[in-house]
Amino acid sequence: MRRFLFLACLLAAASVFAQPDTTSQERLKVISADPAAQRSAIEAGKKLTFFCANCHGEAGVSKTPEVPNLAGQNPAYLLEQIRKFGAGERKDQFMQGLIKVLKDEERVQVALYYASVPVVPSPADAARVAQGKVLFAKLCARCHGEQARGNELYPRLASQKMPYLQTSITRYRDNTGVRNNPLMTIATAPLKNEDISALANYLTQLP
């Protein structure tokens, strides 16, 4: 099972950036390598994200349980998701409309800003945390990282809101969401509702 998940993980990784905006990703790398340029981009990104706060909260920490935190995400991952919304590969009418008005440089700035902001863990049920830790290590850590902080291909799950985590995992398991993913379907297929609750409790309290 682990070997199969690893192979599926590699296949999924190859498809995540099927049509990447290499120019913006290269620009992100250039800015990230220059501390002064990075600080300037972060400040610009902070000003640009005023229209995101209604849903994703101030500084990317959501006040709405069902909406994901953007704070602390890998900037390359965020930039790719911004591209996907702008290109219509991810479907959300509100998000698509907002992102289409951003220039390429502004998209990079927004990604760098959110990545720079720390996210605060949420309280969790200690008994469920222990169970969730075992499940995460078995099913999720290979792609999302041992600390669930993600990377350029996979999102950070640590410190996400519990309702958002539970809803997202359930949708992947049941194939009821708009973001069906074969790898996630394989990983979540054996999960019972109580397992999903345990995973959410574990992830939400991670720093």
Image: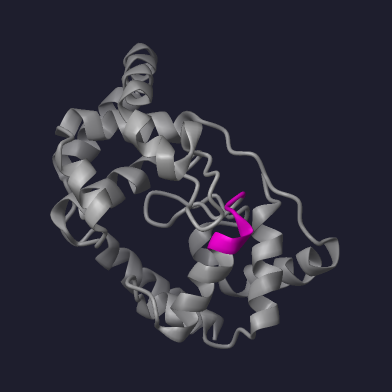
- Give the residue furthest to the right: 127
Residue 141 in sight from this viewpoint: no
Question: Looking at the image, which residue is at 45% across and 43% down?
Answer: 56
Quarter of the C terminus within the rendering:
top right
Q: Quadrant of residue 135?
A: bottom right
Is residue 121 something that shows in the picture?
Answer: yes
Magenta-span inclusion, residue 160: yes
Horizontally, residue 201 falls left or right of residue 116, namely right
Say if 193 sits above or below 136 in the image: below
Q: Is residue 81 left or right of residue 57?
A: left
Q: Quarter of the image containing the N terminus?
A: bottom right
Looking at the picture, tell me which residue is in the foreground, 26 or 182: 182
Q: Residue furthest front?
A: 54
Direction from residue 26 to residue 188 in the image, left or right:
right
Give coordinates of residue 115: x percent, y percent: 44, 35
Color scheme of the displayed model = one colour
Question: What residue span does the magenta drawing correspond to?
Answer: 159-164
Q: Tell me which residue sits at (34%, 70%) in the image.
A: 179
Query: Residue at image x 45%, y 77%?
Result: 172
- The foreground one among 58 and 190 is 58
Image quarter for residue 92?
bottom left
Where is residue 66? Give x, y as percent: 51, 58
**Residue 113 position within the rendered picture, expressed as x and y whole percent measured from the top left:** 40, 29
Outermost residue on the top side: it is 36
Residue 26 lies left or right of residue 119; in this view the side is left
Name the one closer to the observer, 144 or 6.
Answer: 144
